[in-house]
Amino acid sequence: MRFATPLIPATLVRRYKRFLADAVLDDGREVTAHCPNPGAMLGLNSPGSRIWLEPNDDPRKKLKFGWRLSELPGGHMAGIDTAVPNRVVGEALRARDVPGLEAYGGVRPEVKYGDRSRVDFLLTEAGLPDAYVEVKNVHLRRTGDLAEFPDCVTLRGARHLVDLSKMVARGHRAVMLYLVQRTDCGRLAMAADLDPGYAAAFEKARAAGVEVICLSTRITTEGVWAGPPLPLAGG
């Protein structure tokens, strides 16, 4: 997935009201950017950090910049836009480039299912059970190379796990796909201390037959692409 407009660097001043961020461009201009992320963004919203903004000239948009990336130590990057994972995964699915799901040629986004939910992708292929795929954005890292999900309580996320389990009971495949939108991680775990309810729902869903796929990403100032699979911590 390539960004529509070349990104420009800036220094973060503050993130506030969930969806707003003040920043200073390299030419000294102070701007307010849209922050497309409702989560806690732990470790990614520190004042003074280097970030990358996408400018736009859309007259319908009040804010003329969107926050897309945060620089990390060691030359790594993190994507902060929670809308990006679905676009990245959608491209990978259509290219049959997601391990374990390569056999599916039909890729339909945003299909109604379960209790008041829409599945991110419904995969179909003659002779195969339908595969219901939910995508989650991961960008929390607190120790070592361990990515964690979620970074705050997500009742909606837990409900998705219940809905996926129901699809398995009906004879379909159900997949929870975590896209780690940062380049300094090598494993994934559930952040049970931040949301014990989600962690419990995750284990229950796995026991019910919900499959788990975790993908790394390649991130540059030009775009974000799906990378090789990452393992779950502890197997």
Image (cartoon, rainbow, N blue to C red):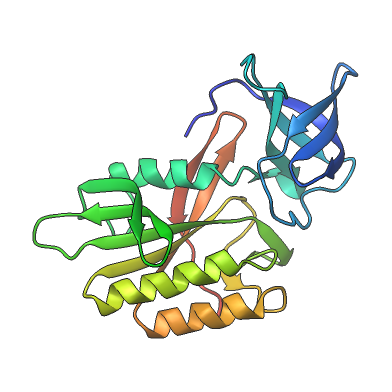
Picture quadrant where residue 150 is located = bottom right
Compared to 41, does 48 lie above or below? above
Does residue 102 appear to the left or right of 227 in the view shown? left
Looking at the picture, how far across and down is residue 145, in whole percent?
A: 65, 64
Does residue 113 appear to the left or right of 226 in the view shown? left
Looking at the picture, how far across and down is residue 42, in whole percent?
A: 77, 58
Residue at the (69%, 63%) spot, across then down: 151
Q: Residue furthest left?
A: 127
Looking at the picture, how far across and down is residue 197, in whole percent?
A: 61, 79
Along the line of sight, the residue nearer the viewer: 48 or 196: 196
Residue at the (40%, 70%) spot, across then down: 163
Along the line of sight, the residue nearer the viewer: 8 or 154: 154
Compared to 28, does 158 lie above or below? below
Does residue 205 appear to the left or right of 16 in the view shown? left
Can residue 187 be seen here? The reply is no
Does residue 90 appear to the left or right of 233 in the view shown? left
Q: How many marks?
A: 0
Can residue 37 be seen here? The reply is yes
Compared to 111, does 153 lie above or below? below
Residue at the (29%, 42%) spot, across then down: 94
